[in-house]
Image (spheres, rainbow, N blue to C red):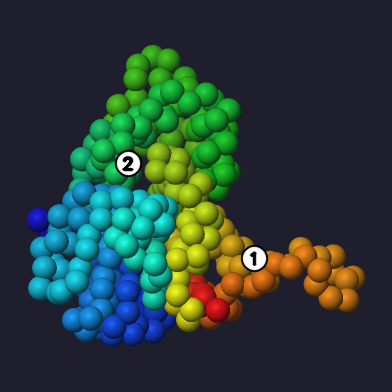
Amino acid sequence: MNFHHISVLLNECIDGLQIKKDGIYVDGTMGGAGHSEAICKRLSEKGRFIGIDQDINAIKASEIKLNKYKNVVLVHDNFSNIKTILKKLEVDFIDGMLLDLGVSSHQLDKPDRGFSYMQNAPLDMRMNQDQSFSAKDVVNNYSKNRLEEIIKNYGEERWAKRIAEFIVKERSKKTIETTYELVDIIKKAIPLGARRDGPHPAKRTFQAIRIEVNGELEILKQSILDIVDSLASKGRLCIITFHSLEDRIVKQTFKQLENPCTCPPEFPVCVCGKKRKVKIITRKPILPKKTEIEINPRARSAKLRIIEKL
């Protein structure tokens, strides 16, 4: 199976994990297994690797790519279920975990997945194809106000209200079935002058709908808390984000874990009793180098943040 994906910030992630050769490491978003294989290469026969992905195609491709390594377990699930996954595998603590929150190149480039506004396909955008809820449901069934809300908040789209209005108007005539039908609606909604500059006019709306379909932001904060609970002392968590909403959640959650005190600033000593759980390794996010962006333009907006369990 050809599951093409260029791993973003690969060396920076591997360095950030500070891999111990006998440790237990988890890739929560395997994709094309680029990061996963780099981790496996650094583990001894006593080390253990757990790969998680909600896309069954990623699991199948990773089985082939990682079959030469020992002590590898692949799990078809969402990383938000990390505690349940580790319990089933009888793993108490892990030494490190990686999350790459971007959509894989395979998902974007495979037309029938419906992620891309550059290729015509059925409206889908499900990372886990076992779930029934898809982009078609969002576009055709959500109220005008709810559509505006997700396009504005998740896509940070200034024309969210007009796009929602145009979607509702068009779907009253017929069900919106394909990506190109949606792209045409978005283009009609955004004034010509606003479409001349910047990214593709459908980019932000497609991002918003994808986030909604897969519940990406809803699960992120609690997932981070659960992962930190699952880390051994000195264990590290590396997270790559690709847009400001994700990065904001990661940044704020890391800060809360490092400084959880809720006492008023005027208190001379802490009385709330909340203890810090992590040390932030990256005060500023690690960004891809110019050379990486030239090779892989999709890396342009990537940011890597790292914490270490105390």
The answer to whether residue 301 is left or right of residue 56 is right
Question: Which disc is residue 108 wearing?
Answer: none
The residue type indicated by label 1 comes to: Gln
- Say whether marks 1 and 2 touch (CB < 8 Å): no
Q: Residues within 10 Å of mark 2 (few under 14, many from 20)?
A: many
Q: Residue placed at 15% from the left, 55% from the top?
A: 60
Task: Locate the C terminus by quadrant.
Answer: bottom right
Q: Nearer the viewer, residue 62 or 298?
A: 62
Secondary structure beneath dot 1 equals helix
Task: Locate the N terminus by quadrant.
Answer: bottom left
Residue 290 visible? The answer is: no
Q: Residue placed at 32% from the left, 62% from the top?
A: 90
The answer to whether residue 257 is left or right of residue 201 is right
Question: Which disc is residue 256 wearing?
Answer: 1
Q: Residue placed at 50% from the left, 65% from the top?
A: 229
Name the residue that disc number 2 marks. 125
Secondary structure beneath dot 2 equals loop
Q: Residue placed at 80% from the left, 72% from the top?
A: 270
Q: Nearer the viewer, residue 115 or 84?
A: 84
Q: Cα distance, mark 1 to mark 2? A: 32 Å
- Badge 1 or badge 2: first in the primary sequence: 2
Q: Is residue 193 above or below residue 95?
A: above
The percent position of residue 66, horizontal first and vertical second, equals: 15, 69
Q: Is residue 298 above or below residue 308?
A: above
The residue type indicated by label 2 comes to: Met
Q: Residues within 10 Å of mark 1 (few under 14, many from 20)?
A: some
**Quarter location, residue 187:** top left
**Quarter location, residue 2:** bottom left
